[in-house]
Amino acid sequence: MDQPIHIVSVSLGSSRRDKTIETEFLGRRFLIQRLGTDGDFQRAAQMISDLDGQAAAIGLGGIDLYLIAGGRRWTVRDAARLAAHAHTTPVVDGSGLKNTLERETVRYLHREGLLRPADGSGRKPRVLVVSAVDRFGLAEAVTETGADTCFGDVIFALKIPLPVRKLGSIRVLARTLLPLICRLPFKLIYPTGQHQHEVHSRGNRWFQWADVIAGDFHFIGSNLPQPGPDNTDLLAGKMVLTNTTTEEDVAKLKALGLTTLVTTTPRMEGRSPGTNVMEGVLVALSGKRPEELTEQDYLDLLAKLAWHPDVARLQE
């Protein structure tokens, strides 16, 4: 029997979230691994070097190789240094898939009438995107639906309590700040290692304001309060749109009263893998290098996989 296609996500995140899954896509067997390095860049670099030429694709987890806004792309210096340790095996961070998969997810939810106010009123749904430059395709798609939006890039990444209400303002901020931010140590703008388990409760006002909370789960999860008798209905009626959720994450969201959890990647053995993992799968299926894949290539592969988002109702 042929050996399964090996896809590995080397993550700067906590090793507590490690997972190995064997599954099948389009009749081909895959061995998918997520290996956390607890924020240790040197360990991640060594892992990537060791996997080079062995795995079919290496995903960068817990870090973005690129941040994107308004048709422009900035390279994150720390991520580029990690990716440089692979000379043969393609390295992906999920940004190519985010631009297609997450746009289509928002369009699907809008088409199915699932983007709606938590209170059942006739107003526009309120959508909090915790970081637009991490998921600009999602942010653009949400804006296209006509929703009332808030972008939390400044709140959650820069730790300044300043909401951004217009996508045009994100474009201006990106052109101004991202050339500098992308040169900073990545841990200053995003939780890595054990910091992913810390609770900060930033932006509580905007979590309460939103009907839909969308984007990276570490930004979402680390800013939610702990479940308890005083906040069992904090997320009642709301939707979280994300991925990379574990069974533990889902239990916490349910305890906070969340009504609907939508994950953009398929749930496998209780886990919705990161976009970097699924991008690695699509790269392997395509037989192309990541830089050769077009937006249409991604859409065609998703159609062959009969992809649709996972929509889970968490309450009775």
Image (cartoon, grey):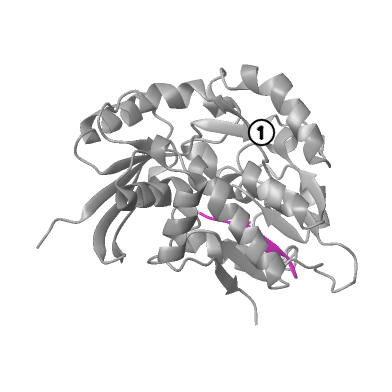
Residue found 69% across the figure and 69% down from its top: 111
Instruction: Quarter of the image for the N terminus: give it.
Output: bottom left
Image x and y of residue 23, in percent = 29, 64
Q: Residue furthest bottom?
A: 316
On screen, residue 282 versus residue 146, left or right, reads left
Image x and y of residue 262, in percent = 59, 64
Residue found 27% across the figure and 27% down from its top: 46
Residue found 73% across the figure and 20% down from its top: 176
Residue 190 covered by magenta stretch: no
Is residue 297 or residue 202 the one in the foreground?
Answer: 297
Instruction: Quarter of the image for the C terminus: give it.
Output: bottom right
In the image, residue 237 above or below residue 138: below
On screen, residue 10 versus residue 136, left or right, reads left
Image x and y of residue 283, in percent = 35, 47
Residue found 45% across the figure and 57% down from its top: 300
Residue 235 location, quadrant:
bottom right
Residue bearing the label numbered 1: 157
Magenta-drawn segment: 236-243
Image x and y of residue 113, in percent = 73, 72
